[in-house]
């Protein structure tokens, strides 16, 4: 894994972020030779509308039956 001193990271931050995004290889930023942070590429998840809200809602009660009792319905 590549290491870079904090001063160099500060001077080239945007270019280093682009490099990590393109290569996918993480970079460790060091201070006085000791690791401080690890820069890793973010996950690129597709904007998929299916299963987006999976597990976010809970079904309570009967969602298939009529809201009012059948006796209240008029038949002609």
Image (tube, grey):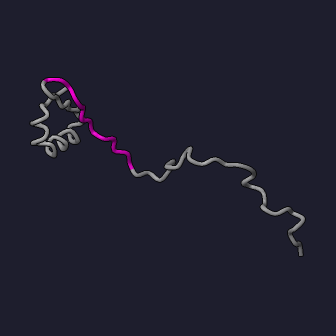
**Quadrant for the N terminus in the image:** top left
Residue displayed at 20% across by 26% down: 35
**Residue at 20% over, 30% down:** 28
- Farthest-out residue, front: 32
- Taking 69 as reference, is 34 left or right? left
Q: Position of residue 58 (x, y in %)?
A: 64, 47
The quadrant in which residue 18 appears is top left
- Locate residue 5, reporting x and y percent: 12, 31
User: Could you tell me which quadrant the C terminus lies in?
Assistant: bottom right
In depth, the one of 54 and 10 nearer the eye is 10
Q: Give me the residue at 22% from left, 33% from top.
A: 25
Q: Quadrant of residue 75?
A: bottom right
Q: Is residue 45 magenta?
A: yes
Q: Nearer the viewer, residue 42 or 9?
A: 9
Above or below residue 42? Residue 65 is below
Above or below for 33 versus 76: above
Task: Give the number of callouts.
Answer: 0
Closest to the observer, 34 or 69? 34
Provide residue 54's location: percent of width, then percent of height: 54, 46
Question: Looking at this rendering, what residue extends furthest in the bottom direction?
Answer: 76
Taking 57 as reference, is 17 left or right?
Answer: left
Q: Is residue 37 above or below residue 60?
A: above
**Image: magenta residue range:** 33-46
Q: Residue at x 16, y 46 (%)?
A: 14
Residue 31, position in %: x, y? Answer: 15, 28
| Residue 16 in the figure: left or right of residue 48 | left
Relative side of 70 to 12, left or right: right
Q: Residue 8: within the magenta?
A: no
């Amino acid at each position: 894994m590549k290491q870079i001193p904090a001063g160099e990271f500060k001077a080239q931050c945007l270019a280093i972020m682009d490099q990590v995004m393109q290569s996918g290889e993480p970079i460790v930023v060091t201070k006085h030779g000791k690791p401080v942070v690890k820069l890793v590429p973010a996950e690129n998840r597709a904007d998929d509308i299916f299963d987006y809200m999976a597990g976010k809602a809970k079904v309570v009660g009967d969602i298939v039956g009529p809201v009012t009792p059948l006796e209240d319905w008029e038949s002609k």
